[in-house]
Image (spheres, helix red, strand yellow):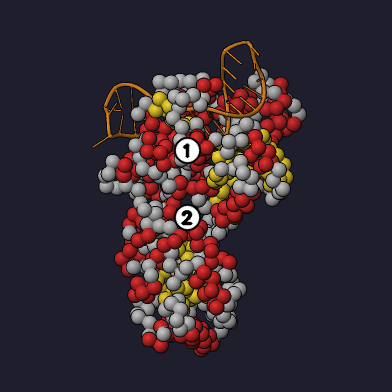
Amino acid sequence: MKTTKKMNNQEISRLLKAVSGAYEVKKENQFKVAAYDKAAVAVEHATSELKDLWDDKKLEEIPSVGKSIAAHLDELFRTGKVKHFEQVFKGLPEAMFEFINIPGIGPKSAYKLAIILKITVAKQAIRKLLLAAKSGKIAQIEGFGEKSQKQIIEGIKAYQKGATKQNRMNLPYADRLAHEIMAYLSLIPETLRVDTLGSLRRKVATIGDIDISVATRKPDKTIDWFLAYPKIHKIVEKGLSGATIILNNGRQVDLRVQGPDSYGAMLQYFTGSKQHNIHLREIALKKGLSLSEYGIKPTSLRQPAELRGSPKIQKFTGEEKFYQRLGMAYIPPELREDTGEIEAALRQAKGKEGGLPKLVELKNIKGDLHVHSNIQIEESHDPGMDSIASMVEKAKALGYEYLGFSEHNPSQSQHQEKQILDLLKYKKETIEQYNYSRVNNVFYVFNSLEVDIKPSGELAIPEKAFDLLDYIIASVHSEFNLSREKMTKRVLRALAHPKVKILGHPTGRLLGKREGYELNWEEVLGFCLKHNRWLEINAFPDRLDLPDNLVREAVKRGVKMIINTDSHTTAQLSLMEYGVDVAKRGWATKNDIANTQPYDKMCNEIKKGPPSLTSRL
DNA sequence: GCCGTTTTCGGCCCGACTGTTTTCAGTCG
């Protein structure tokens, strides 16, 4: 396992996993093995790049990274390698560290395969393993058989496809798919309750498989009904407690069924996250309790499986009582990532300070300040599809008080300055007329623009144009590869303009397509706090940007955010809920989110000044 | 190796599934 100086979190996670695997093969203390494994998972899920934490000497802030591992990582960042790890890897075939990345192969199998098949070097190791499997050599190894050989072939295929990382659905897509199936499951009377589970229930930005649970007294009927779902491509697995299918669109759906009396424990268990559940069980253990998907029992009772469901197990119909039994307040699924929510829930239950936040909700949202209409102002890119009027109708139906029309700026290359000013005057007049025409309806329309931030940090409209607008959303739409320093300078220069109130989709990421650009968040957050600028939580499905971890940072520092949909059609206005989900995952309360304010306050905040009487009446 | 309002020593999450097994080891979530 080679190490290089500039490793990212994923690579470091793999390195730690390799150390764990090496220790396991060498029969090192099992808790040491587990410690490295835990650290690997923690690094994978870390919300900051370790390199940055190392710069700030904060490596030990990652849970499960203690003195020893931090010291090793320090050596890694300083010298590009870790002598101790090299010692650990000594005597083990490089190839095994390739193999452990294949689903279904753990350290022991990886080692055995590498040794017996004499595949030692990392290069081409997986290809050689595949050849060995296909020629039937693996089935002959003791402990392996035909089936494991086949499984390895499947595993390699999945690995090569990158099935683990890519190919994830974005949250809104998965959510809608799940709700179709949930509606179907609700059609039969045996279905008492149906929920999403796993990352979907926790509202993670990207989802692998769809997990759904049903409370039912007749599990077999429910499962049969599920397996009769019309859009099934194939049935992968059918058991007593659930089933797995592949849909026609290639997506995997797992169903879990449970009787209503144990439903709460099951819901809790399969919602995860894994880290959250592990931490819960550790706490339960100290209270002499053991948790499982069936309920809570005293640890003194080591019952064999057939005694499951004996009265000694305390069952839970819902999750609230489950958490209560552990001495904590109910934890919303969005927070269950073991990033401090358990400690907060314990404090809250004891009536102490520092409890769980009261999370912002969709119903708190009073308006959307980033939508695009089809008004003709010859924008540089991506015009909206629907009229101002229809967007407003939809917004009113959603219960909003205001909308901000933020079309892209007219392209600078195609227009003279005067043309741009004329187009923006036309837009201002249109908007004002619109406000004026809504005599008795209390609904307001802001006149805004989403302006490109040029690589220099200049804004892509003429200086005179600023006076024609209520506020500006500044966004990066080009040159994503600038260095962190240059990008930070670029963004801060744009934010410094007094009309700029919002930094649009702040990291520029496109889920599954493009990593975000790098920014010095210390500086950006500091600037926003000091000068009262808002970071956008863009709810568009492949953006969900700010990411939840940065929302959390912003919340910690008191930087305000605004949840916008970036809608280009009326239908997209209802994407707001996914932006709210991101905010929740970042622990945001109503007060952290600017567009929970009613119109009057919003108006003051963006320094529009009170609207003139003519435009208000 | 990590971690701590019951501990700086002495613990460390739980169960299912699979495949290969005559009683269990490895992997996964």
Q: Are marks 1 and 2 on the same chain?
A: yes
Given residues A459 and A217, the one toward you in this image is A217
- According to the picture, the residue beneath numbered tag 1 turns out to be A317
Q: Is residue A321 above or below residue A480?
A: above
Residue B15 x, y percent position in the rendering: 52, 27
Considering only order in the chain, which callout, 2 or 1, is on the residue closer to the N terminus?
1
Q: Secondary structure at mark 1?
A: loop
Q: Is residue A130 above or below residue B9?
A: below
- Examine the rendering and report whether any part of residue A608 can be seen: yes
Image point 60% across, 33% down: which residue? A241
Is A383 on the left or on the right of A475, as rendered? right
Residue A61 x, y percent position in the rendering: 36, 43
Image point 47% across, 65% down: which residue? A564
Residue A471 x, y percent position in the rendering: 42, 76
Q: Chain of mark 2?
A: A
Residue A34 x, y percent position in the rendering: 45, 30
Q: Chain of mark 1?
A: A
Q: Secondary structure at mark 2?
A: helix
Q: Is residue A188 above or below residue A565?
A: above
Image point 41% across, 88% down: which residue? A614
Local crowd size for mark 1, using a 10 Å CA cut-off: few (<14), some (14–19), many (≥20) = some
State the quadrant of the C terminus of chain A.
Answer: bottom left
Q: Which mark is residue A581?
A: 2
Is label 1 in contact with label 2 (beta carbons under 8 Å)? no
- Examine the rendering and report whether any part of residue A458 can be seen: no
Under mark 2, the amino acid is Asp
Under mark 1, the amino acid is Thr
